[in-house]
Image: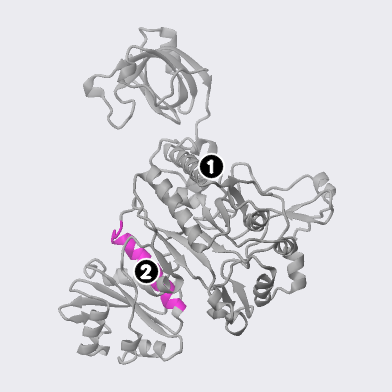
Amino acid sequence: MLRTKTCGELRLANVGETATLCGWVEGYRDHGKLVFIDLRDRYGKTQIVFNPDESAEMHAASRSLRSEYVIRVTGKVEARPKDMINPKLATGEIDLRAKTLEILNKSKTPPFEPSSTELPAEELRLRYRFIDLRRPSLQEALILRHRITLLTRQYFDSQGFLEIETPMLGKSTPEGARDYLVPSRVFPGSFYALPQSPQIYKQILMVAGYDRYMQIARCFRDEDLRADRQPEFTQIDVEMAFVEREDILNVIDGLIAYVVENVTGQKIKLPLPRYSYHDVMERYGSDKPDMRYGMELVDISDLAAKCSFNAFKAAVETPAGRVRGLNAKGAAEKYSRKTIDELTAFVGQYGAKGLAFFRVKEGALDSPIAKFFSDEEQREIIRRIQGEPGDLLFLVADAKKSVTSAALAALRSRLGKELGLFDPSHVQAAWVLDFPLVTYNEEEKRWDAEHHPFCYPLKEDVPYLESDPGRVRAQSYDLVVNGNEAASGSVRIHDAATQQKVFDLLGISAEEAEVRFGFLLEALRYGAPPHAGIALGLDRWVMMLSGNENIREVIAFPKTQKAADLLSGAPSPVDAKQLRELRIKVDLPT
């Protein structure tokens, strides 16, 4: 080994020892006689002291050192004077007094300093990712990712699961997002697809008798990106046979408690709360609400129908119209008319045509529209939304329930952050159950699967598959953590007849189903057991537990929002010879 210790290892107990360290130069301070260097590796930092009394040649060489040079230093561990101790540094009580110095490699002037507290533009950091990865916060995130992965495998092993790899090159079976396609050289004109998930393969494993499967699985989806999405991502994939929904929930409850306690020290109370999809949509306007704080939505449609405010009355006169609101406790003096105008524009992004507001005073409402409500109506609104003096009430009216839900859910999330209503380090997890099996696609005039086509309907809802599909609930479930969808799964359809009923509802004929999913349907005809599964987004879990809001901060080599790898230059054109071998002709628009 070129080193005997890491840069984060030496302590007072090592004083008097000789140690050899290797790392990158982070800080350089020349005090005339003495030269001080901060030497960094992924384990920490150690201050190196170069004294000309040890070696004039070595001292001269130390003055040539620059940021990000890679060096090897051997020296004696010394205690720092008490007035020179750095309590912020794990090695802050010692120095290494250099005896020898070897420059292993020089560095060009970096485009940014990994130790800088002011980060440059993300594109520059992704272009020079090999430098960005030296940042301590990014290293900590990747170390945390390793720990979570290790804990996950330990937990599932203790529960009798087998980790089984499924293919990367498979058949294209579109499940909503676009597939990434891989052309076959051996079969000209045919393509493999990279997996959007191991869904079909893991169901086949259940048919094959591997009743407890898990995998840290790489998945690929060619879809529009955002801060918490990547074209290639990792999920903790789980499937179990001879189980019901509650069995899956209990296993994942245990996983969450095990991982969170080992990572954060927080003990999660089990079982995790269970809510229906209908319940959370009514109370929070979202199927992934942040439950670290209250501020639940309240419906006042019946009161709105009686008032003289035309915007409210017009909304509730429509069959699906609603007037709903929330109470920002104690926020009346925190939001000026200007900031409320900003909030109005904000909810407009979610379809709301306006944002009504009332400041609560003693038994009355203060607002430009308060005159349209009688004293009795004002008192009833205050009672309904549990208003107190100093509270700020926000209301959204619309002919569509979905608009009031989306606008108020977004407003609630924003207010929760701005008002500091939750502890960012606290993990609050809950299950959302009984999602709709299908949703109606207005543009294409057809039913789409809410999750995917393999979800088993609730048994009591199966009779409505033909007569009232929108009423059918799926045996599906999402794990919601701090306002994020952290896992999603369902009880699977395990018989071909029920599967074809769902396909029929989705407009997938028996012939098309055989072409797209034939190998799964065939497997279901050979003794498929009842089974269920779930997938947890590993990247998202690391993002949440590391306190990040951008998923690219917890992936070593992420893509941009346009799915480009700025480090390697991918995607890029390929050699004409490769295209000829694949029988592919590229026809670019002129």
In contact (CB < 8 Å): disc 2 and disc 1: no
Left or right: residue 143 compared with residue 167: left
**Residue 129 in the image, given as x and y percentages of width and height:** 53, 40
Left or right: residue 269 compared with residue 509: left
Give, as a three-letter code, the residue at label 1.
Ala
Identify the element where label 2 is drawn: helix
Please state which of residues 227 and 288 is positioned toward the viewer in this rendering.
288
Instruction: Name which residue lies at 81% across and 49% down.
Output: 579
Q: Which residue is mark 2?
A: 411
- Scheme by which the image is coloured: one colour
Please state which of residues 460 and 350 is positioned toward the viewer in this rendering.
460
**Residue 158 in the image, given as x and y percentages of width and height:** 50, 43
What's the magenta region?
402-422
Tell me if residue 112 can be seen: yes
Please tell me whether residue 22 is drawn above or below residue 440 in the rendered image.
Answer: above
Left or right: residue 363 compared with residue 227: left
Occupied quadrant, residue 412: bottom left
Give, as a three-letter code, the residue at label 2.
Leu
Disc number at residue 532?
none
Please state which of residues 32 and 337 is positioned toward the viewer in this rendering.
337
**417 is within the stretch colored magenta:** yes
- Circle 1 Cα neighbour tier, 10 Å, few/some/many (<14 / 14–19 / ≥20): some
Identify the element where label 1 is drawn: loop
Instruction: Name which residue lies at 34% across and 91% down.
Output: 305
Quadrant in the picture for the C terminus:
bottom right
